[in-house]
Image: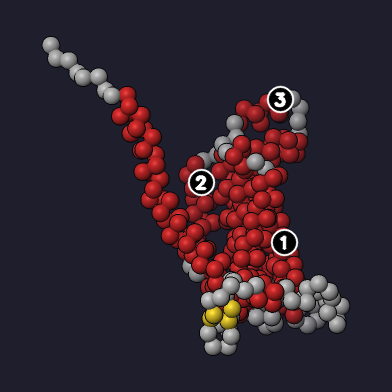
């Protein structure tokens, strides 16, 4: 008859306490190396001075002061300063993109989750939705130019149908074309989290609402929308963070004529004004964090998940 030695509870407790920490160590290292350290360097450079020839590693608030220079009053034309105007323009793009992608994303996710019964068909439709992501964003944006240009397909069709007498100039290199490109590029970032939330809804709740006499719209508003809040929040965070920092879409679809915060930072770096660009990046980061904080106040994602 063989006996086994009792395990040491102290060593078992130690292994349990050390195990999760060791498992999280590689992820923590990646987070520190690829996020915290670069962010710290950007914050440090934002307090440096600079001239036409070099960076001067001395502590100064010159870049932040220059960024908000003249913003305490309207200029001679009655307009806001460049920084405030640029941030407001970027926020308008972010809000417009968020609203349109939310409507489209929710409708498509609702259709996939509640009207497509077959898992195979759902997978096929998702693959079709992701096909545009197989190519570059720039290529996808450029594909709109032959359609929306002055002599593009849309203008030619409208004139051929005698709906317009001359080409519509606002279709391309305008706020409309930038917003259209944003919706085209980023709607999928809203569809996926909302769809995941809807797939986790207990279908018996919907049946109970219908048995209680609720209409389709009442069931949608009182059952499906509240239970999809986590997906809506995650998709909203994706949209705001991507659009607020974007500069490629504004440059290509705006014809280099429309201002955005990302575009302003890109121009500042091209002129080697790295401390000014870093200060602008820190202000942008704080702005995005405030938006995310406001969204999380509306929906407590920790409870929803």
- In the rendered image, residue 96, in percent from the top left (x then y), is placed at 72, 61
Q: At 75% from the left edge and 67% from the top edge, which residue is drawn?
A: 88
Q: Quadrant of residue 222?
A: top right
In three-dimensional space, the C-alpha distance between marks 1 and 2, rounded to whole angstroms, equals 31 Å
Q: Residue furthest front?
A: 58
Residue 208 in view, yes or no: yes
For disc 1, the marked residue is 96
Q: 10 Å neighbourhood of mark 3: few (<14), some, or many (≥20)?
A: few
Viewer-proximal residue among 137 and 269: 269
Q: At 69% from the left edge and 45% from the top edge, which residue is drawn?
A: 297
For disc 2, the marked residue is 121
Residue 157 in view, yes or no: no
Label 2, secondary structure: give it.
helix
Which mark sits nearer the N-terminus, 2 or 3? 2
Q: Residue furthest left?
A: 1
Q: Quadrant of the N terminus?
A: top left
Q: Residue furthest bottom?
A: 53
- In the rendered image, residue 289, in percent from the top left (x then y), is placed at 64, 56
Q: 10 Å neighbourhood of mark 1: few (<14), some, or many (≥20)?
A: some
Q: At 75% from the left edge and 80% from the top edge, which residue is drawn?
A: 169
For disc 3, the marked residue is 211
Name the front one of labels 1 and 2. Answer: 1
Q: In the picture shown, does residue 214 fall above or below 147?
A: above
Label 1, secondary structure: give it.
helix
In three-dimensional space, the C-alpha distance between marks 2 and 3, rounded to whole angstroms, equals 29 Å
Which mark sits nearer the N-terminus, 3 or 1? 1
Q: Quadrant of residue 73?
A: bottom right
Q: Quadrant of residue 83?
A: bottom right
């Amino acid at each position: 008859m063989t006996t086994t030695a009792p395990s040491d509870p102290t060593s078992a407790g130690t292994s349990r306490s050390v195990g999760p920490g060791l498992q999280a160590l590689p992820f923590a290292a990646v987070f520190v190396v690829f996020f915290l350290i670069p962010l710290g360097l950007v914050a440090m450079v934002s307090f440096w001075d600079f001239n036409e020839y070099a960076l001067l590693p001395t502590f100064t608030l010159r870049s932040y002061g220059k960024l908000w220079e003249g913003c305490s009053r309207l200029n001679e034309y009655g307009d806001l300063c460049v920084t405030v105007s640029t941030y407001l323009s970027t926020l308008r793009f972010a809000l417009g993109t968020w609203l349109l992608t939310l409507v489209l994303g929710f409708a498509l996710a609702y259709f996939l989750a509640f009207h497509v019964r077959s898992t195979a068909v759902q997978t096929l439709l998702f693959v079709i939705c992701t096909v545009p992501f197989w190519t570059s964003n720039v290529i996808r944006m450029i594909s709109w130019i032959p359609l929306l240009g002055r002599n593009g397909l849309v203008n030619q069709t409208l004139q051929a149908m005698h709906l317009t007498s001359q080409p519509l100039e606002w279709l391309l290199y305008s706020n409309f074309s930038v917003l259209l490109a944003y919706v085209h590029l980023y709607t999928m970032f809203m569809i996926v989290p909302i769809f995941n939330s809807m797939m986790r809804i207990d279908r018996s709740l919907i049946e109970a609402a219908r048995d209680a006499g609720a209409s389709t719209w009442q069931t949608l508003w009182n059952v499906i929308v509240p239970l999809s809040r986590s997906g809506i929040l995650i998709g909203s965070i994706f949209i705001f963070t991507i659009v607020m920092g974007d500069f490629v879409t504004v440059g290509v679809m705006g014809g280099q004529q429309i201002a955005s915060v990302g575009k302003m930072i890109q121009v500042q770096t091209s002129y080697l004004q790295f401390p000014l660009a870093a200060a602008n990046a820190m202000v942008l980061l704080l702005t995005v964090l405030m938006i995310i904080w406001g969204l999380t106040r509306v929906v407590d994602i920790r409870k929803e998940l």
